[in-house]
Amino acid sequence: MRVMLRARLDTQVSNEAIKNGTLPKIVQSVTEQLKPEAAYFGPCDGGRTATFVFDMQDSSEIPAITEPFFLELGAEIEVYPVMNAEDLRKGLAALQG
């Protein structure tokens, strides 16, 4: 299932991760794990935010995916099922039949 994960990083913790050089390593590790179709980084709700869109095979993957953000960056996490335009067309077509 295609999902979107948004991680809002704790400012104090992510400041320290930037200073000590661990933030790029954490982002690289998560990106290698998720193999996202898209990854975005920027401000949101007054803090640093990382957003990934990727395929999650099973909900049991959630702890392995989210814990690095919680443990290493003090992040607040949201995970949503999402669709691209093709998925939406397919879903709407199923309503017609």
Image (tube, rainbow, N blue to C red):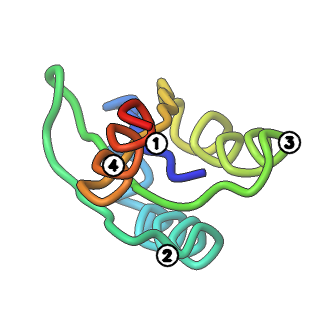
| Label pair 1/4, CB-CB below 8 angstroms | no
Mark nearest the camera among 1 and 4 is 1
**Residue 60, above or below 75:** below
Which residue does the image show at 73% across and 41% down from the upper left? 62
Chain-order first, disc 2 or disc 1: 1
- Mark 2 highlights which residue? 28
Chain-order first, disc 4 or disc 2: 2
Q: Is residue 40 left or right of residue 6?
A: left
Mark nearest the camera among 2 and 3 is 3
What is the total number of numbered labels drawn onto the structure image? 4
The image position of residue 85, as x and y in percent, is: 23, 55
Q: Dot 4 lies on which element?
A: strand
Q: Mark 3 Cα within 10 Å, few/some/many (few <14, many 20+)?
A: few
Chain-order first, disc 1 or disc 4: 1
Residue 5 shows which numbered tag? 1
> Foreground: 40 or 27?
40
The amino acid at mark 1 is: Leu
Residue 60 shows which numbered tag? 3
Q: Is residue 75 left or right of residue 43?
A: right
